Image (tube, rainbow, N blue to C red):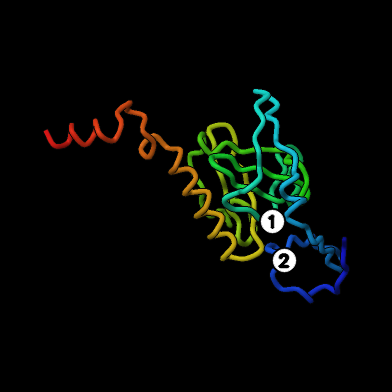
Amino acid sequence: EFVRVPLGTIKNTASRGIAARKSQHRIRFSSMAAMASRKAFTDPQTGIKYETTNPEFQGWLTKQSSWLKEWRRRYFILKDSKLFFCKTESGAPHGMIDLAHCMTVKSAELKAQKRNALEVSTPDTTFLMYADSEKEKDDWIGAIGRAIVRCSSTYTNEDGMDDEERDSDESN
């Protein structure tokens, strides 16, 4: 299930789920069955279970831990308005960022002191992470940004009117 290759053999580490090691990369070839069988995330505060199968976007980022401020490589899964993170590509998520409460997603090289860094800010926490390349960082910022817009009040129908009511209101 694992293959070892010399460091530098594979260029794009994030898209292949490679965990960097001192002198080697360790590659895990995961099947679609492993992804489909990933356990749901249960929110410890609400007890609500969230499925992470069929994500909109997924891949490796390195995230700063909240307590020790250490950088840890995590597999991120974007589904609906939730951003989950796991220790392995097929493992159960152990954390979630609710993007419905997110204020911003933006580049954060200076703040993180890391290349290709981004931040996701909620009223309570600012999450710092970095990608393996500038393109991957930009892809993540775009995907997270779109998710934030989808769950914002300006995008959703929070005025209580359906489309027909809104159309007839606008034509009067």
What is the number of the mark on residue 26? none
Q: Identify the element where label 1 is drawn.
A: strand
**Disc 1 residue crowd, few under 14, some 14–19, many 20+, Cα 10 Å:** many
Q: Quadrant of residue 23?
A: bottom right
**Disc 2 residue crowd, few under 14, some 14–19, many 20+, Cα 10 Å:** some
Residue closest to the eye, 20 or 77: 77
| Residue 156 image position (x, y, % from top left) | 39, 36
* Residue 67 horizontal side relative to residue 54, left or right: right
Q: Residue beneath label 1, please?
A: 60
Residue 172 at least partly seen: yes
Residue type (three-letter) at the residue carrying disc 1: Trp
| Residue 111 image position (x, y, % from top left) | 59, 51
Query: Dividing the image into 4 quarters, which one contains the C terminus?
Result: top left
Q: Identify the element where label 2 is drawn.
A: loop
What is the number of the mark on residue 13? 2
Q: Residue furthest top?
A: 46
* Residue 18 horizontal side relative to residue 130, left or right: right
Q: Residue at x 35, y 37 (%)?
A: 154
* Residue 151 horizontal side relative to residue 110, left or right: left
Q: Report if the CB atoms under discs 1 and 2 are less than 8 Å apart.
A: yes
| Residue 110 image position (x, y, % from top left) | 58, 55
The disc, 1 or 2, on the residue closer to the chain's N-terminal end is 2
Residue type (three-letter) at the residue carrying disc 2: Thr
Query: Dividing the image into 4 quarters, which one contains the N terminus?
Result: bottom right
Residue 23 at least partly seen: no
Check the image and report above or below for 88 versus 165.
Answer: below
Q: Total label count?
A: 2
